[in-house]
């Protein structure tokens, strides 16, 4: 345990377990610490049913309805485009251009080239103060190689984040490995946690810390540790069921929850813990892979997502696509509500986050990259920004960087800031 003489250090550790911001981490009579900003980027593939996504005159939207409880923290932005995604490439460039707004080099080999993504620009600045500069997550295994889309290497669909023009970053889809990266110390505690709880391993440290805390901090630590234990329990349950053939999915790692929704919620809970304990301030999460053929029986959609996205304006396909879109939004809403419930100093975690959610494709039937489904959540909203003319997606990236304290004059093809953000 790391403790100062009169107050707890901000990065107090229990074994390998970081703690959230506590009142006792601020010295008596000192000014409250300036809140830190977290940035998160959340990708859904194959665009959306834009008509059902875009809020109407009354502000309502069928697809965005699950965000009702956090609506005051949501800004929808209409008529954004990414010109550099027209290479062609379609799926590959939709994914790779989402955070880079750069033109991907057409190649099926290892001589791929893109650009540094906005999350990695942020990580080099605001990530220097955290154990993990950034965290890259996904829902699917990314083991495809070679040509995946019209002459573009699979790496363009596999990776959202690039640390340089030639360095795509792998994303982790296994909750156990994410948990160990967040809380493991490289050995003992992580190994023990596979069969028991990391909290049991550091029980004496927890008891010693709690004796030094006031009632409010004890409650905050107790709630946080209970969240850690619940995440561990769900990971262990999934691993116990890993041998069941009925639970196997070619796109899903062995040992993760059987249903897509349970897996996604677990991954979101890990992200809440990562933000809460200030382990990282920069996240990216690919919620499904471009050209995914995943079905969503949870919402009554048994047709594969990719063929369904080629809707040809068929009303039934469009309605099913809207259900898939709303399901993804609902899972994101679960995450936002968790952030809203977690205290972060004098505010909530959601108040101190800037989170972009959306797709690099607009209308999936024609594989375009205009009128993209994009929203920003956290320290923003409620509003609907509706541009009359197509506006670069890069403007949103530049604005979020600025809001997080990262100063740049230009990002990719940006031509200004989003003043309303």
Image (spheres, helix red, strand yellow):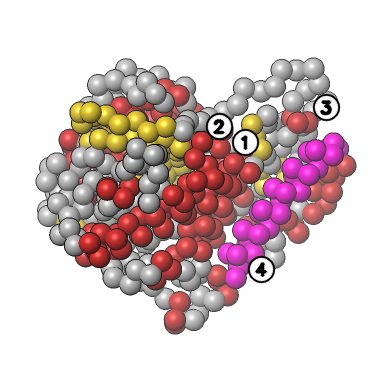
Q: Are marks 1 and 3 in contact (CB under 8 Å)?
A: no
Q: Tell me which numbered mark, 1 or 3, is placed earlier along the sequence.
A: 3
Q: Tell me which numbered mark, 2 or 4, is placed earlier along the sequence.
A: 4
Q: Tell me which numbered mark, 4 or 1, is placed earlier along the sequence.
A: 4
Which quadrant is home to the N terminus? Answer: top right
* SS for dot 2: helix
Name the mark nearer the viewer: 1 or 3. 1
User: Which residue corresponds to mark 4?
Assistant: 195
* SS for dot 4: loop
**Can you give x and y, in whole percent of width and height, for residue 86 in the image?**
14, 41
- Quarter of the image where one finds residue 120: top left
* SS for dot 3: loop
Q: Residue at x 34, y 35 (%)?
A: 77
Classify residue 123 as left or right of residue 222: left
Q: Tell me which numbered mark, 4 or 3, is placed earlier along the sequence.
A: 3
Name the mark nearer the viewer: 4 or 1. 1
Q: Residue at x 30, y 31 (%)?
A: 386
**Can you give x and y, in whole percent of width and height, for residue 290 in the image?**
27, 55
Q: CA distance from mark 1 to mark 2?
A: 7 Å
User: Which residue corresponds to mark 2?
Assistant: 352
Q: Tell me which numbered mark, 2 or 3, is placed earlier along the sequence.
A: 3
* SS for dot 1: strand
Instruction: Tell which residue pokes out farthest to the bottom in this image.
Output: 245
Part of the protein shown in magenta: 212-237
Name the mark nearer the viewer: 2 or 4. 2
User: Which residue corresponds to mark 1?
Assistant: 348
Classify 303 as above or below 166.
Answer: below
User: Which residue corresponds to mark 3?
Assistant: 5
Task: Decide whether residue 78 is among the magenta residues.
Answer: no
Which quadrant is home to the C terminus? Answer: top left
Instruction: Tell which residue pokes out farthest to the front in this image.
Output: 58
Q: Residue at x 57, y 28 (%)?
A: 36
């Amino acid at each position: 345990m790391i403790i100062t003489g009169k107050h707890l250090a901000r990065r107090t550790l229990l074994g390998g377990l970081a703690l959230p911001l506590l009142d006792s981490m601020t010295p008596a009579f000192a000014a409250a610490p300036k809140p830190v900003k977290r940035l998160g980027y959340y990708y859904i593939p194959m665009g959306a049913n834009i008509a059902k996504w875009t809020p109407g005159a009354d502000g309502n939207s069928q697809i965005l309805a699950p965000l009702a409880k956090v609506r005051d923290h949501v800004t929808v932005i209409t008529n954004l485009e990414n010109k550099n995604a027209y290479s062609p490439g379609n799926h590959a460039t939709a994914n790779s251009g989402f955070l880079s707004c750069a033109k991907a080099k057409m190649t099926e080999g290892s001589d791929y080239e893109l650009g540094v993504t906005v999350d990695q620009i942020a990580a080099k600045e605001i990530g220097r103060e955290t154990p993990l500069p950034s965290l890259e997550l996904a829902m699917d295994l990314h083991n495809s190689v070679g040509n995946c889309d019209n002459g573009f290497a699979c790496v363009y669909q596999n990776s959202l984040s690039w640390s340089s023009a030639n360095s795509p970053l792998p994303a982790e889809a296994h909750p156990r490995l994410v948990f160990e990266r967040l809380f493991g110390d490289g050995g003992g505690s992580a190994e023990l946690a596979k069969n028991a709880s990391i909290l049991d391993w550091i029980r004496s440290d927890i008891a010693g810390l709690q004796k030094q805390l006031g009632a409010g901090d004890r409650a905050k630590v107790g709630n946080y540790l209970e969240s850690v234990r619940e995440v561990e329990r769900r990971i262990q349950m999934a691993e116990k069921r890993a041998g069941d053939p009925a639970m196997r999915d070619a796109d899903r790692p062995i040992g993760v929850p059987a249903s897509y929704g349970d897996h996604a919620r677990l991954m979101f809970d890990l992200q809440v813990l990562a933000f809460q304990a200030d382990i990282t301030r920069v996240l990216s999460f690919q919620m499904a892979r471009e050209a995914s053929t995943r079905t969503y029986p949870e919402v009554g959609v048994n047709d594969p997502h990719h063929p369904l996205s080629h809707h040809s304006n068929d009303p039934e396909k469009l309605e099913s696509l809207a259900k898939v879109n709303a399901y993804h939004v609902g899972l994101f809403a679960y995450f936002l509500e968790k952030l809203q419930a977690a205290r972060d100093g004098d505010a909530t975690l959601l108040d101190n986050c800037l989170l972009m959610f959306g797709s690099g494709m607009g209308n999936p039937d024609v594989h375009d990259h205009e009128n993209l489904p994009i929203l920003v959540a956290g320290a923003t909203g409620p509003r609907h920004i509706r541009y009359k003319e197509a506006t670069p997606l890069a403007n949103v990236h530049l604005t979020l960087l600025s809001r997080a304290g990262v100063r740049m004059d230009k990002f990719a093809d940006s031509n200004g800031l989003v003043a309303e953000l």
